[in-house]
Amino acid sequence: MSGGLRIVAGEWRGRKLLAPQGDTTRPTADRTRETLFSMLVSRLGDFEGLRVADLFAGSGALGLEALSRGAAHCLFVDQDPAAIRAIRANIANLKAQPRSDVRASSVLSLGPAREPLDLVLLDPPYDTGAGAVAVDKLARLGWIGEGTWVSLETGKGESVAIRGFEADAERDVGKARLHLLRRT
């Protein structure tokens, strides 16, 4: 597992995170995460008490960033065993177990939600359309409600059109395009 990833702000600011070994995961760069979280802060105000999901979680950096900034709870989902090991190690290093739920499965195999989340962070493989499929399914299963903010990271050239959602903002950062979506 390689280093280089850090928490950008909050309780764990500057703490290093482990990235999964191998090339199946593409961790979100610190600069991209910083841009995303400044976009979210300008809309949410803060993260205090929010219920968050980090889907296609990789290292768990997005969800851990939200927890560092005061989110109450985060669900981490990834199906890659190396990613699950990295997520669990990062959660243990930050002693974040009480506020974390890790699921080793496909995002598409999540069942119905008890209630909608406040923020859903998705960083699926680029150029696959997996993010749009996941957002559509999660909305139908009740994970994404009227008040839920959805962040979807895609490759720079990708556009996103999901029935029942509108883009509140899009921003290119390096090789990534960040989409903030709301239900219409």
Image (cartoon, rainbow, N blue to C red):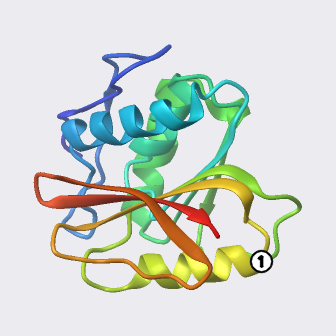
Q: Is residue 112 left or right of residue 28?
A: right
Question: x%, y% of residue 182?
Answer: 58, 61
- The residue shown at (74%, 60%) is 146
- The answer to whether residue 141 is seen in the rendering is yes
Label 1 packing within 10 angstroms: few (<14), some (14-19), many (20+): some
Label 1 sits on what residue type?
Leu
Question: x%, y% of residue 163?
Answer: 57, 85
Vertical position of residue 122 compared to residue 127: above or below: above
Q: In this view, does 16 lie to the left or right of 133?
A: left
Vertical position of residue 92 compared to residue 116: above or below: above
- The answer to whether residue 106 is seen in the rendering is no
How many discs mark residues in the rendered view?
1
- The residue shown at (66%, 33%) is 97
Vertical position of residue 92 compared to residue 118: above or below: above
- The residue shown at (51%, 69%) is 166
Tell which of 120 and 25 is nearer to you.
Answer: 120
Q: Which residue appears farthest toward the left when viewing the image?
A: 174
Secondary structure state at the residue bearing disc 1: loop
Question: x%, y% of residue 175?
Answer: 12, 60
Vertical position of residue 104 compared to residue 42: above or below: below
Q: In this view, does 75 lie to the left or right of 3?
A: right
Query: Which image quarter: residue 179?
Result: bottom left
- The residue shown at (31%, 86%) is 128
Residue named by callout 1? 141
Tell which of 85 and 112 is nearer to you.
Answer: 112
Tell which of 20 and 107 is nearer to you.
Answer: 107
| Quadrant in which the C terminus is drawn | bottom right
